[in-house]
Image: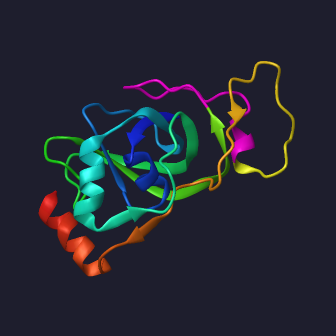
Amino acid sequence: MITIQQPWAALIVAGIKDIENRTWTTAYQGPLLIQAGIKIDRRGLRRLDELGLELDAPLHRGVILGSVHLGEITRSSASPWARPYAQHWKLSDPQPVVRLLEARGQQGRLFDPPPDWRRAFTEHDAGTTRLSRVRDVPADEVAPRFREKVTPEAALLAALNGG
């Protein structure tokens, strides 16, 4: 599991952002849970506006939002999300949760998820463990949805021009 600030975490789980920029690397490749951090990156909110994207739901924080597949990590990605001089973590196959589960995160490193994290991906409750560190979070919508304020071509052009 990895903690990522909003709105970046929501963009990743929505399949819009395919690269996570980090100053560090890992040998790990495979399934990776995305936990939305408590803080919101104001620069990210400005970036949403530049790309012509608008949220249809609130940015949930402190919860497991979904999972992705972490592939190769490189310094040379052609993705418009890749920043110069950063480690580019290639993300694919985003899977949003079915229900939000509160989970404590840890900045700056990968960490083990809570024992019953799989509850986030099923509508029926398979039971909780006594050591559970997660709890259901009531929400009108499980995951934020994005609406385009501009055409997809204009959003891509803005992404390419903005880095």
Image x and y of residue 29, in percent: 47, 42
Q: Is residue 57 magenta?
A: no
In this rendered view, identify the residue nearer to me: 86 or 76. Answer: 86
Residue 127 falls left or right of residue 52: right
The vertical placement of 145 against 131, above or below, is below
What secondary structure prevails in the magenta region? Answer: loop
- Residue at image x 52%, y 43%? 60
| Position in image of residue 7 (x %, y %) | 38, 48
Q: Residue furthest top?
A: 131
Residue 55 in the figure: left or right of residue 117: left
Above or below 43: residue 53: below
User: Picture coordinates of residue 123 (x, y %)?
Assistant: 79, 52
Point 40% across, 43% down: residue = 6
Residue 79 showing in the rendered view: no
Q: Which region shows up in magenta?
A: 103-120
Q: As drawn, is 161 to the left or to the right of 23?
A: left
Q: Residue at left 41%, top 38%? A: 4
Asked whether 74 or 102 is in front, the reply is 102
